[in-house]
Amino acid sequence: MTKHFFKKIKNPQDIIQLTINGIKNSIKNIGLYNKKSSNIYNLSNILINKYHGIIPNNILELESLPGIGHKSASVFLFHRSKIPVFPVDTHIHRMMFRWKLSNGKNVKQTEQDAKRIFSKKKWKKLHLQIIFYGKKYSPSRKWNPKKDIIYQKLVHNHLL
């Protein structure tokens, strides 16, 4: 779906020309497409009128855009800037909780714990490693602690 959409779309001006209905038709196969269409259109308008078509490199400005929350802003900065961020998704949140590295009730609290624990130089690499590890060895459903190598090491060394 996104490949097809982004073949047509190269910049915010292309989205504005597409209109909200055009966006809806392009993304109707995904959930919440009505709200997402509106957010995409409004975000594009703001990018054109306030930022001259340039996506801001500031987390607060990104989070002020329609449809952009903390995680999306962090992931964008993670991939597109040298600003140190440690985006926390459900996999990282789950791993940090299982490994008792965080007791955060939400991803923002877990993110603060991760930033406190891990060296800033390693954030980018660790972010991806924890996600891939969590998907492979510590899934949310049917988790088998015996197959979770890191969990086993922590238990064996009496750290859990």
Image (cartoon, grey):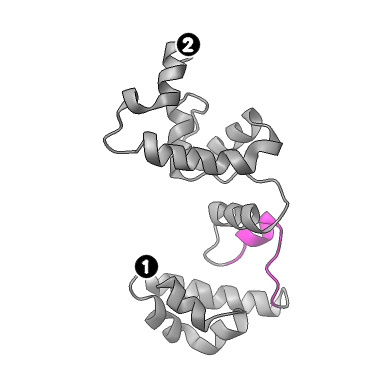
Query: Main SS type for the magenta part?
Result: loop
Residue at 73%, 78% in the rendered image: 52
Residue at 44%, 72% in the rendered image: 2
Mark found first going from the N terminus, 2 or 1: 1
Which residue is denoted by mark 1 in the rendering?
32
Specify few, some or many for label 1: CA neighbours under 10 Å numbering under 14, 14-19, or 20 or more: few
Front disc: 2 or 1: 2
Residue at 70%, 64% in the rendered image: 56
Q: Is residue 28 above or below residue 13?
A: above
Residue 157 shows which numbered tag?
Answer: 2
Residue 63 within the magenta-colored segment of the rendering: yes
Residue at 55%, 37% in the rendered image: 109
Query: Which structural element holds mark 1?
Result: loop
What segment is highlighted magenta in the picture? Answer: 53-65
Amino acid type, callout 1: Leu
Query: Which structural element holds mark 2?
Result: loop
